Amino acid sequence: MPVDLLKTIGCMYVTLVPVILAGILNMIWVKLPVLKFLSKPVDFGKDFVDGKRIFGDNKTWKGIAGYLIFNTAFTLLWGLILRGSALEKWDFFYITHDNTFSYNLLVGVLLGLGYSLFELPNSFLKRRFDIKPGKSVSGLTKVFFIFLDQADSIFGVALVVWLFYDLGVLLYLLYVLIGAATHLILNMLLYFMKLRKNMF
């Protein structure tokens, strides 16, 4: 594998550290018996015009709040850790922008929004296929949704990265593929740790 590609992949992972940590912590957060008033579905239990739920019960305001809070907190913390270090320029967010508190605050909020909002179209699509929240299907449809389940939030996260660093289409798609693979591995680990009901 070319050295430049290895460095690019390394930059991707350095950039994704806050997002990975936020995603893991959010899975624990949504299960905690706190702020239960936020555990209401984003679609408020409403149906779409086809008579099926818009997103389902698994997409809650508590989940979105968690993504926003944890992505912001970890982005601010990661910025402090990287400041002045050799790894700072391995983070796409700091290649062309200064590592400042206000900048990191903006990036953290956008990462939280990108992560959570880009999960919603996937949930909407699953409801149209009558796939129950948290459940999987069989055949080619299963393969498609396994990939989409891992990649949906990464589409949003990589788009946020692209706002601040010119990834280009090919690098953006590579980001999505690597992010999806990483997401899949993390989900498998969380399943074995009993933090997820399903491996996929």
Image (tube, grey):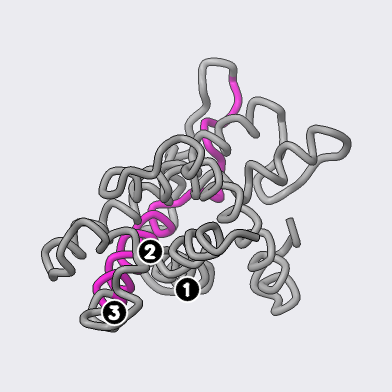
Q: Residues within 10 Å of mark 3 (few under 14, many from 20)?
A: some
Residue 66 bears which disc, if any?
2
Which residue occupies 53% across, 41% down? 173
**Residue beneath label 1, please?**
25
Q: Amino acid at mark 2?
A: Gly
Start-end of magenta stretch: 51-78
Which image quarter is the N terminus in? bottom right
Q: Is residue 69 magenta?
A: yes
Asked if disc 1 and disc 2 are in contact, CB closer than 8 Å, the reply is yes
Viewer-proximal residue among 108 and 5? 5
Give the vertical position of 66 relative to 74 (above or below). Answer: above
Q: Can you tell which mark lies on residue 163?
A: none
Give the Cα separation between the discs numbered 1 and 2: 8 Å
Residue under pointer 3: 82
Residue plotted at (74% across, 48% down):
135
Labels 3, 1: front one:
3
Q: Residue at x 68, y 65 (%)?
A: 185
Visible residue check, residue 87: yes
Picture layout, residue 85 above or below residue 179 = below
- Whole-percent x, y for residue 25 in the image: 47, 73
